[in-house]
Amino acid sequence: MTTNSNSGDVLDHSLAAAGVNRINWAGREMPVLEQIRARFKKETPFKGLKIAACLHVTSETANLMIALRDGGAEIALCASNPLSTQDEVAAALVSEYGIKTFAIKGEDTETYYNHITTVLETKPHMTMDDGADLVAMLHGERNDLMENVIGGMEETTTGVIRLKSLAEEGKLKYPVIAVNDADTKHFFDNRYGTGQSTLDGITRATNILWAGKTVVIIGYGWCGRGVAMRARGMGANTVVCEVNHIRALEAAMDGHQVMKMEDAAKLGDIFITVTGGMKAVDSKHVEVMKDGAVLANSGHFNVEIDIEGIENLSDSRTEVRPYVDQYTMSDGRRINLLGEGRLINLAAAEGHPSAVMDMSFADQALSAEFMANEYQNLDNQVYVVPRDIDNEVGRLKLLSMGIEIDELSDEQEKYLNSWNTGT
């Protein structure tokens, strides 16, 4: 049963009770966001503001939306990936929390963009993006909906790349905070969150044994670092492919084999893309892969694997397990593509653990508050999260974990900030 109205477009309202349970369960692991929500409820920093959000519709995202709602915002939420929605969470947001939500797991491309359009038609004051699809549509075919927008936030590496490109061309029409670039986001969400959830998604889809497998990680940014670290921890032989000399050097010194993709393609059992770019796995790589090779993507969009190229090389495609499409090549080799080449950690699993999203969404919430207060003082550029916000999120997370750290004495502070005290 699909419900489509001004309040949302979700699969089935009867799933709402299960969604509430999931939202509450995630909330147990998100104490920093809960502290922020409680303050927002008292101070209502978003009173009178509309926020359009294009994020993965998960139980963690629901807790962020509730915090913003309690801060006085009117929310309209859609999915940032057709396969990442948790339908019970979407139902709960509409039925139990009064938050407009337009998201159905497995929605087709037309529905996906219709949902984005519907969210933008609420004429928001702020955008909250995961991949910059909202911003792209606002700056393209629906620039007629731009008039109220004062600022935005972007959650992902891929989205930040798109926004910086827009800004460099002088076409960005409002300031955006790159939440992805906060230390409390990329050090933890990208590294530990992506590392764990990617392996979780691949394991759920395939039930594969990692020990002894050769795992090729394409891209060694913070996500790639996390994936490689966790794969090696599971007993895999890890190979890293990179185009950045310094990251490649770091991977080598972290103990991974480093080589060109054309060489790794012949060796790998499992290939994981985390580049933010396109065709990290190309058809020429697939031509030399082993029978039974597994291809998975944990970058944002499904362009990192050349799916069209694989289809052109193959004689047939069969869904052999949920989220596993097996392509049979003309020479009989079988290549297994997971989750339609989309984010495997959300397509086949539940995405990042709540405890790590606690920090990312705390950054989102506090950045939104900063934007609401400071937008008039900002140019139409991409900004990093203010350092005091980053530090405060780290402080609150440590506090929630029962960890205390040292503070500099006045003498130590003076020494570190002076030039005339030497040996």
Image (cartoon, helix red, strand yellow):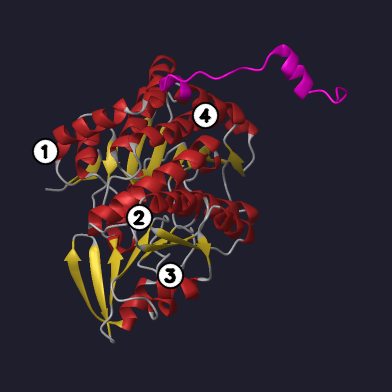
Residue at x 41%, y 53% (from the top left corner) = 232
Read off the residue under disc 2: 343
Mark 1 vs mark 3, CA separation in Å? 41 Å
Choose between 325 and 69: the one closer to the eye.
325
> In screen coordinates, is 372 left or right of 315?
right
Q: What secondary structure is found at the residue carrying circle 3? A: loop
Q: Quadrant of the C terminus?
A: top right
> In screen coordinates, is 200 left or right of 174?
left
Query: x%, y% of residue 383?
Result: 60, 40
Read off the residue under disc 4: 372
Q: Residue furthest bottom?
A: 331
Read off the residue under disc 1: 14
Q: Earlier in the sequence, mark 1 or mark 3?
A: 1
How many neighbours does mark 3 have within 10 angstroms: few (below 14), some (14-19), or many (20 or more)? many
Q: Is residue 299 above or below residue 152?
A: below
Read off the residue under disc 3: 281
Q: How many marks?
A: 4
Mark 1 vs mark 4, CA separation in Å? 36 Å
Do tag 4 and tag 2 residues touch (Cβ < 8 Å)?
Answer: no
